Image (cartoon, helix red, strand yellow):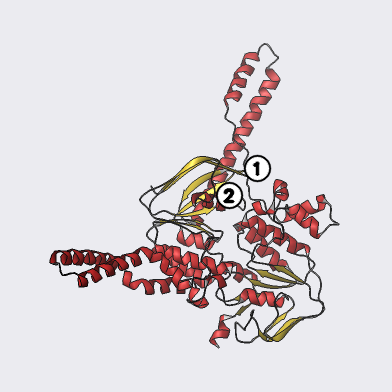
Amino acid sequence: MYLEVKNLSMTFDKKVLYNNINFRILPKEKVGIVGPNGVGKSTLIKILGGEIIPDTGSIEFDKNIKIGYLDQYAKVDKKKRIIEYLKEAFSSLYNKEEKMKEYLKLIKSTTDSSLHTRYAKSASIIQEELEANRFYEIDSMIMKVAKGLGITNYGMQTELGKLSGGQKVKVVLAKLLLEDPDLIILDEPTNFLDESHVEWLVKYLKEYKGTFLIVSHNQEFLNDVVNVILDIDNTQVKKYKGNYQAYEMKKAMDAEVFERQYAAQQKEKAKLEDYINRNRTRASTAKMAQSRQKKLDKMELLEKPKSQNVPMHLKFNYSSISSHRFLVVEDLEIGYYFSLLPKISFEIKSGDRIAIMGFNGIGKTTLLKTLIGELKPIGGNFKFVDDAKIAYFEQEHHFENDNISPLQYIQEIYPKLNEKEIRGILAKSGIVGPLALQPIKTMSGGEQSKLKLCLVTMQKANVLVLDEPTNHLDANSKEELKKALINYPGTVIFVSHEHEFTNAVATKKFDIEELLLS
């Protein structure tokens, strides 16, 4: 047993996430942690990683195993270069090498034969350890992982401080994988990976001989790599054996059985109550009524089936457009201080849904920010039709004031709307009840994404520019977003690392990588 969680309870901002949950993680289990947005998946990962202390309960790891935890906010030396940082995964081996070099120096400097023999033996033992741990293959192992995750595209001599948040997370993930722990704990590892790098990670995890726990909303990814699912629902955790598809089938069957049991119990309860009410005052049947009352009192009532997954009902606000030729891009050069890519030229017609493709770090986000006017082009030009109205969804979760609630957030932007109107708008994005009143900073990543999508739906636009809109969203929310985009009559320019979502939504694809190959 690698991990045992006993009687764990956690309340976060007055919301009960878990109530006395218990589970074990065994060697060679590859575990996916799932559940609707806001149930506490990432919080559980942070508790296991030691970032958050639970209200009650205990967490016991096997003391003999090495644990790797992906901290997306890990502090790193900004001056350190990528290659130097990745080599830290092998620091213990480099220390052994230094020790071996010391012994070799001592061998050369001593004339004492007994000391000479002792130093030679010590150096030989370390040499065997280094060879057993593939010390002389470190450079190739680093390059294999770095290339697989797309890190080599940034330049291995690049300082960590010059990387974006997503790029830094990939480097931290690479170091964790190179450390080869017995138990890996990951929160949304595919969020910053494009399709080819997700495929590489899938292959890596399939071959990985250890155990891992992963939070992910990417169903395809989970289906490929896990053999156990931990489902968080209604403050409880249930363990299912099998991949994501098997879990969905088993959970649906469990829900169907429970609903039948609940319905049967409710029918029996109503029948008993009816008999008691009709017969308790009649002398001839009072004893029978009392007997049924005792039976009713002893009945352990099942809780009415409910789901914490609040549905979204997205509909984007469309503003009509005068021209069919919507956007023309000619010899556009994008970047911050210098051009990242060769000149870009393409054309978008009104109603096109175009997916911007390419590996992470190639410039997809930079292109979107240039098109919305946030960045100035290095060269070339682009022109939208005169009456173009843009609504933008930013990948990073930035809020000027995350201490306010979603209701206050919308109120500040649209002061003419009253509370009832705002609550109705938020509800369509799956933000209901107390969630509409809690501070934004206490919301899960998925809930924050829903709030940002809510704001996009409120803007009257004819082009939606969306940068990784599916990040953090649960399966049902992604499905609703997909349908809303397909039904939207305007133009959509988007980036997504999720293959299935992209294929369903896009009518055209623009692959930036092809520019590098041409």
**Which type of secondary structure does the marked residue at label 1 adopt?**
loop
Left or right placement of residue 101 versus residue 380 in this view: left
The tag on residue 40 is 2
Q: Mark 1–mark 2 contact, CB under 8 Å?
A: no
Q: Is residue 103 left or right of residue 62?
A: left
Q: Which amino acid type corresponds to the residue marked 1 in the rendered image?
A: Lys
Q: Quadrant of residue 102?
A: bottom left
Q: Say which label, 1 or 2, has the lower sequence index.
A: 1
- Tell me the CA gap for discs 1 and 2: 13 Å
Measured as percent of width and height from the top left, residue 467 is found at 65, 69
* Callout 2 amino acid: Gly
> Relative to 275, does residue 167 appear above or below in the rendering?
below
The percent position of residue 175, horizontal first and vertical second, equals 45, 65
* Image point (57%, 45%), residue name: 255
User: Which label lies toward us, 1 or 2?
Assistant: 1
| Residue 209 percent coordinates (x, y) | 37, 60
Query: Considering depth in this image, is 245 or 39 the residue closer to the camera?
Result: 39
Per the image, the residue denoted by label 1 is: 14
Residue drawn at 63 percent across, 61 percent down? 478
Can residue 353 be seen?
no
Disc marking residue 4:
none
- Circle 2: is it few (<14), some (14-19), or many (20+) Cα within 10 Å? many
